[in-house]
Amino acid sequence: MPTSTRERIVHPDVAAFDLATIMRTVGDPVRLEIVRLLGDGDEHLCGELSHTLEIPASTGSYHLKLLREAGLTRTRAEGTQRLISLRATDLESRFPGLVAVLTAG
């Protein structure tokens, strides 16, 4: 597929991170559990996360979209797969100590 028509995954800049938005986003137990799963520092497949949490793929995609829009996660396309990771370094640079609080469990 030509680059011009390829999907572009948008992530907010670190300077745009808003603590209230982040806390509201992780206020949902499913999203908080996703953040905790991503706390291992690895990339995880979108479907793997949904399977681990025993939720439908569409529900998992919805929660991952909200986490990405809040700046908590990074989504990387690899063919038809979507690999998700926690933006730990970016979050720590903006809100020191936040990642440790969110991933403790």
Image (spheres, rainbow, N blue to C red):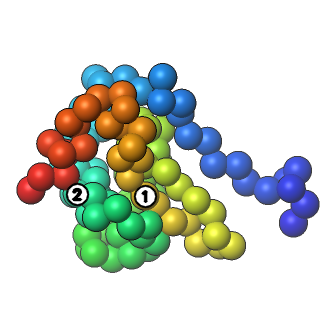
Disc 2 residue crowd, few under 14, some 14–19, many 20+, Cα 10 Å: some
Instruction: Find the residue positioned furthest to the left.
Output: 105
* Residue type, mark 1 in image: Ser
- Seen in the picture, residue 78 relative to 91 is either above or below; the reply is below
Circle 1 sits on which residue? 85
Question: In the rendering, which numbered label is found on residue 36?
Answer: 2
What residue do we see at 42% from left, 27% from top?
17
Q: Nearer the viewer, residue 69 or 89?
A: 89
User: Sequence order check: which comes first, mark 2 or mark 1?
Assistant: 2
Residue 23 image position (x, y, % from top left): 24, 32
Q: Amino acid at mark 2?
A: Arg
- SS at badge 2: helix
Residues under numbered marks 2 and 1 in contact, where contact means CB atoms less than 8 Å apart: no
* Quadrant of the image occupied by residue 24: top left
Q: Position of residue 103 (x, y in %)?
A: 19, 52
Depth check, front residue: 94 or 56: 94
Give the quadrant of the N terminus: bottom right
Label 1 Cα crowd, 10 Å radius (few <14 / some 14-19 / many 20+): many
Q: Residue 66 sits in which quadrant?
A: top left
Q: CA distance from mark 2 to mark 1?
A: 11 Å
User: Taking 46 as reference, is 16 above or below it?
Assistant: above
- The residue lying toward the viewer, choosing from 24 and 104, is 104
**Residue that appears at 42% across and 38% down:** 90
Residue 17 in view (yes/no): yes
User: Visible in this render: residue 58?
Assistant: no
Q: Position of residue 52 (x, y in %)?
A: 28, 75
